[in-house]
Amino acid sequence: MTEGPIRVVVVDDHQVVRHGLRTFLDIQDDIEVIGEAGDGNEAVEQICALSPDVVLLDLKLPTVDGVETLRMLRDRGNTAKVLILTSFTEPTSVVPALRAGASGYLFKDVDPEALAQAVRAVHAGQVLLEPEVAAALVSGDGRSDRSTSLTEREREVLAEIARGRSNREIARALVLSEKTVKTHVSSILAKLGLADRTQAALYAVRSGIV
């Protein structure tokens, strides 16, 4: 059975930016822009109503900023993958969004083809975590010894998650079934008290597992 296109909602307060993103993404055979919003409150309503696969979310928005928008979505139980699209070049500006559950970030001057690849990557369950952002996340957090509760195999799976690999890719790398990988991922999240793969990837970086 052929899967449908990746359904995307674009959130940015500049109409020209939204139009440009929509124009490029809509020419991709496997990506479809199904909605757009210009502020945080509108974004929450659109995303909850349309249930997109991926959200391109600007950090600087009127009424409600990008980080709070993301928190509101998670509070409502929305599970869309969120890719931060920002003009901020300072990594620490993006850290709150990643901690709130974003799957990665891009700068607004990103190459169009790289943007399309990033949408595909987060849709596949990967985490786009640049080294400088990982370093910013480490700052002030310290190390945790919760990883001692993990089995050796779970530590291997966690390391692969931190490298941005999907369950299918982890299964191939570790010669496991995809179902077994899913079981390990669930166990890792439960043992470490984490909500999702993004938090697991950040934990692995902070704890020195990768």
Image (spheres, rainbow, N blue to C red):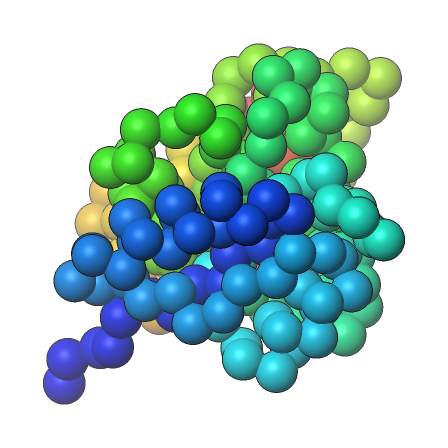
Q: Measuring 50% from the left and 27% from the top, which residue is drawn there?
A: 107
- How far across and down, in percent of the image, does residue 138 sit? 72, 19
Residue 200 visible (yes or no): no
Q: Is residue 75 left or right of residue 156?
A: right
**In the depicted view, which residue is nearer to us: 88 or 177?**
88
Residue at image coords 22%, 77%: 3
When the figure is inspected, residue 208 is found, relative to residue 191, above or below; the finding is: above
On the image, which quarter does residue 176 sit in?
A: bottom left
Q: How many marks?
A: 0
Residue 191 at x, y = what percent? 70, 54
| The N terminus sits in image quarter | bottom left
Q: Where 109 sits versus 103, above or below?
A: above
x and y, in percent, of residue 169 in the image: 27, 49
Residue drawn at point x = 27 percent, y = 60 percent: 26
Residue in front for this viewpoint, 194 or 35: 35
- In this picture, residue 202 sits left or right of residue 162: right
Specify whether 175 is left or right of 80.
left
> Quadrant location of residue 99?
top right
Q: Nearer the viewer, residue 80 or 164?
A: 80
Whether residue 23 is visible here, answered yes or no, is yes
Looking at the image, which residue is at 40% across and 48% down? 21
